[in-house]
Image: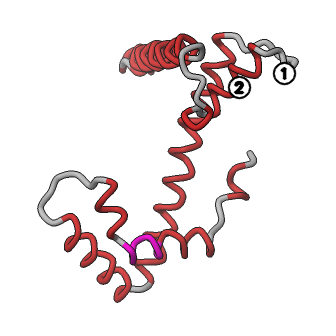
Amino acid sequence: MDVLAGVVNRLKDISQGLDAFLDDVSEKYQSSKENDDQPSKKCFIKILLQLEKESKIEIDISQDNLKGILLNMFLRGVDTSSITLEWAMTQLMKNPTKLKKAQEEVRRVVGKKSKVNEDDIDQMVYLNCVVKGTLRLHPLLPFLFR
């Protein structure tokens, strides 16, 4: 039935697109690892590739290994962000006055712009406190180990 509905073909297309994206990202990391020797500009993947190059780790990081690490990093970031947002919204829904205060701050800082930028985030002090309070009440650590 899934074949008739096109679900299987759609999943294959998505899988191929994701694989191509991860190939592109991992190739960019591998091609830039020789060009970037500034420690302050290195991220986890670049440090890992550098350690492999210097034979300081015992494993060989293949293209598939690198793609797996990248996929895990992308998915974990989405997972933890969505969990935090769910808890924050739950807490705000239970406290309507705090929800109203957070909404007013966002409307005041962002205004009629269609996108929020980093400068806006720095100005949203109350919303930052909401996020920190959410993480204090509902720490993500238990969810990270599956």
Q: Nearer the viewer, residue 143 or 60?
A: 60
Instruction: Write down the residue under mark 2.
Output: 48
Q: Amino acid at mark 2?
A: Leu
**Residue 48 higher or lower than 117, as above or below:** above
Q: Circle 1: is it few (<14), some (14-19), or many (20+) Cα within 10 Å? A: few
**Residue 82 higher or lower than 132, as above or below:** above
Instruction: Write down the residue under mark 1.
Output: 57
User: In which quadrant of the rendered view does residue 135 lie?
Assistant: bottom right
Pointers 1 and 2 in contact (CB under 8 A)? yes
Q: Amino acid at mark 1?
A: Ile
**Residue 123 higher or lower than 29, as above or below:** below
Secondary structure beneath label 2: helix
Q: Is residue 60 magenta?
A: no
What distance separates the C-alpha of mark 1 from that of mark 2?
9 Å
Taking the image as shown, residue 133 lies to the left or right of residue 58, namely left
Tell me, what colour scheme is on the image? secondary structure
